[in-house]
Amino acid sequence: MVVLTERYADRISGTLSCFDRVVITGTLPEICHAQAMGRHLTERGVRLFDYTQWAEPLRDEIHQHALRLAREAGLTIEFIRRKDFRKEDRVRELLEKRGNHPGLVHIFSAMESCQSFKPWYDKATGKTSLRAREGRCLHYYFYFIDRDLGLCYLRVPTWAPFRLQFYFNGHNQLACQLSQRGIGYRLVDNVFTEIEDFTRVQDLADSLRAETLHRILDRVAGWLCPILPHFKTGYHWSLMQVEYATDIVFVSLKELRPVYEELIRTAIHTVKPENVATFLGRKLDERFEGEIGNDFHTRIEGTRIKHHMGRNSIKMYDKLGRVLRLETTSNDVTFFKHYRRVEHRDGTWEMKNAPVKKSIYSLPAVAELMKAANRRYLEFLSALDDPTWRRSSGVSSISVVFRAGTFRTSCLARRLLRSGAS
């Protein structure tokens, strides 16, 4: 079989695979769950019913630190009241005026849900403990440009257990590496449309090290989260959401359009549940209780098809009309399995195929697994025949969902399928 990148080699300027959106969670092991928090308070002679009084000074410390950072950077903290407010758009406006030099860009604040605890007295046992509950507190979003990662943000809650959320984009991180090495490129709307040396840049994309990322995360947490010195263990960083993209860059819009339109209109009919599982490196069996399906959408930017399996998905869409992007997304990296060392409670260990750990040190394994998923999807697309049905006008959305071995098709999709078959 000849894959698309070989079939249309004369129309393609290069191919690049790298991380896209990466969201990382930071937790303090000393207080990250109810039992740990209770133990932390008891060791310091604090009554469990005084949990609120213990947390309030730390809340005020975070608040004062945010005000000080804003004052030093000449910024005003912007409180978000609207649910439909897009922070990214506001940051983009500021960057057009500010430029891309390293440092703090903007600070948002918003009242959002957070994990919390409440004291509980058990009359039957006569013991007091903490129980987890959902609460709301003020959160600060610190948007900044890092010299190694580019544009990032750190979300800092003002209430215990102070779980952080860190975001960076692999394309921005790679752009920083290219600038530092003097390699020519053009990055537009989170996609490289031009690269001086695709082979060398792919090597750089594959060289992201978890150890380096860990040092950056610790440095950022120490800068923006002032309560860190109160806890001995520091933050533990784990993967919350990971996107990995394979971009096939065509030389022009007219070269990609006919190829893409054939692929997108055929894939919605040909991709079955077992195909989705295969793309993502799994086998479909009756034990899987999640949802598997295909979604096709027409957006302002163009069209997109997504195949999802539980909390993981793989999709195809066009960027700027020139780049065919295949992208695997995971909201739970333990969905993937790889061959690794597994340690048992009795101290023994063995090498076996096991779920990926959520630690940031799993990033190299996640990159390989997601790159392989994109490759399998590309091979499947390369084997598709030309579509035998005409595109119907006015169609904006199709959804095909498979659940528990059966499938449901929307009325709109059924009408389209019938009209397309004729």
Image: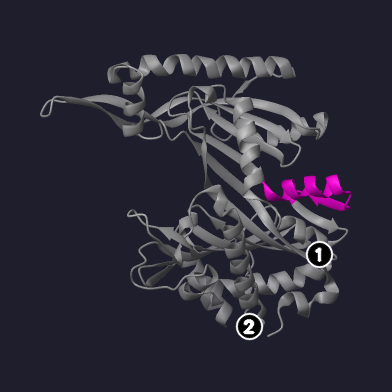
Task: Examine the image and state in which quarter residue 305 appears.
Answer: bottom right
| Alpha carbon separation for disc pair 2 and 1 | 37 Å
Q: State whether residue 177 appears in this view.
A: yes
Tell me what residue is drawn at x 51 percent, y 48 percent: 359
How many numbered discs? 2
Residue 199 has which mark? 1
Tell me what residue is drawn at x 53 percent, y 33 percent: 83
Task: Examine the image and state in which quarter residue 404 appears.
Answer: bottom left
Mark 2 or 1, closer to the camera:
1
Image quadrant occupied by the C terminus = bottom right
> Residue type at mark 2?
Thr
Residue 347, percent across and down?
Answer: 37, 54
Q: Earlier in the sequence, mark 2 or mark 1?
A: 1
**28 or 144: nearer the viewer:** 28
Residue 25, percent across and down?
Answer: 52, 40
**123 or 303: nearer the viewer:** 123
Please indicate whether residue 199 sits to the left or right of residue 222 in the image.
right
Q: Is residue 294 magenta?
A: no
**108 or 82: nearer the viewer:** 108
Residue 388 has which mark? 2
> Residue type at mark 1?
Thr
Q: State whether residue 76 appears in this view.
A: no
Residue interval drawn in magenta: 169-190
Q: Is residue 182 magenta?
A: yes
Residue 176, percent across and down?
Answer: 79, 45
Tell me the element at label 2.
loop
Tell me the element at label 1.
helix
Image quadrant occupied by the N terminus = bottom right
Tell me what residue is drawn at x 70 percent, y 70 percent: 261
